[in-house]
Image (spheres, rainbow, N blue to C red):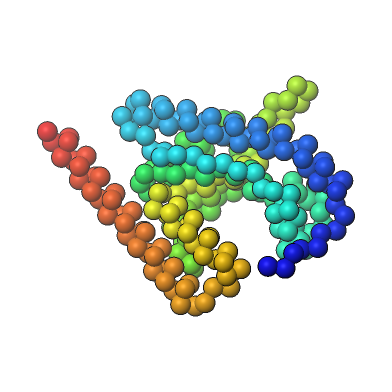
Amino acid sequence: MKELELPDVKDVLVEYKQMKLLYKSALKEIRTKLEILNDEFKFVHKYNPIEHIESRLKTEESITRKLFRKGIGVTMENIQKYIDDIAGVRVICSFTPDIYRIVDMISAQDDIEVLKTKDYMINPKPNGYRSYHMIVKVPIFLSDRVVPTKVEIQIRTVAMDFWASLEHKIYYKYEGNAPDYIKKELKECADLAAFLDSKMLAINEEVKSIQQEE
């Protein structure tokens, strides 16, 4: 892959490093909220909808590349305005209904502002990708001010996460230009993952029904 020649944006990136404090704090805030909601759900319903939670911060190079692709200048204002996924949280669920339970629970939080949502469960991407994306703002309380900070939340099942992780690795090897037959096979695997989710949900509902009858 050809190395990208970056312009002299050192001043901007130094300022961005200072902004990392906000995004790191936002990740902690969202993770804590999700863990509390999961614990409460487990206490009330004897069931935890969240298998595990992952989080990451976008690198300076990744942010710069994304702005270049958009044809936008590298400034702090543009970073904050056009990059929604600097701070990212991925929530891995057991079953597909859990995705919407978590969406509802997050949306009901008084101090969280939901800016955007994309439902790739109902409308999967052409390659078969399924997930639910939310862009939210969470207030970060500093010593002298409150700074609303954006976080992207991706919510998917274990099967969807398995497929998405491997699809990303395969596409990386082809630098985004995989042969058509590979794309076709990946789409078939995505459909199989969706079928597996459906079957596992049906089995789980059947087990619950039997337990209620006992």
Relative to residue 46, is residue 168 depicted above or below? below
Extreme bottom residue here? 180
Residue shown at the point (72%, 38%) measured from the top left: 20
- Between residue 23 and residue 40, name the one nearer to us: 23
- Between residue 55 and residue 98, name the one nearer to us: 55
Relative to residue 185, is residue 6 depicted above or below? above
Q: Is residue 171 visible?
A: yes
Residue shown at the point (17%, 36%) measured from the top left: 211
Q: Is residue 104 visible?
A: no
- Between residue 41 and residue 21, name the one nearer to us: 21
Relative to residue 211, is residue 143 depicted above or below? above
Quarter of the image containing the N terminus?
Answer: bottom right
Q: Position of residue 60 (x, y in %)?
A: 74, 49
Q: Is residue 195 left or right of residue 54?
A: left
Q: Position of residue 210 (x, y in %)?
A: 15, 40
Q: Is residue 163 left or right of residue 74?
A: left
- Between residue 1 and residue 12, name the one nearer to us: 1
Residue shown at the point (38%, 30%) measured from the top left: 41
Quarter of the image containing the C terminus?
Answer: top left
Relative to residue 178, is residue 64 depicted above or below? above
Residue shown at the point (32%, 60%) measured from the top left: 195
Q: Is residue 95 left or right of residue 139?
A: left
Quadrant of res 140: top right
Q: Is residue 110 left or right of residue 48?
A: right
Extreme left residue here? 214
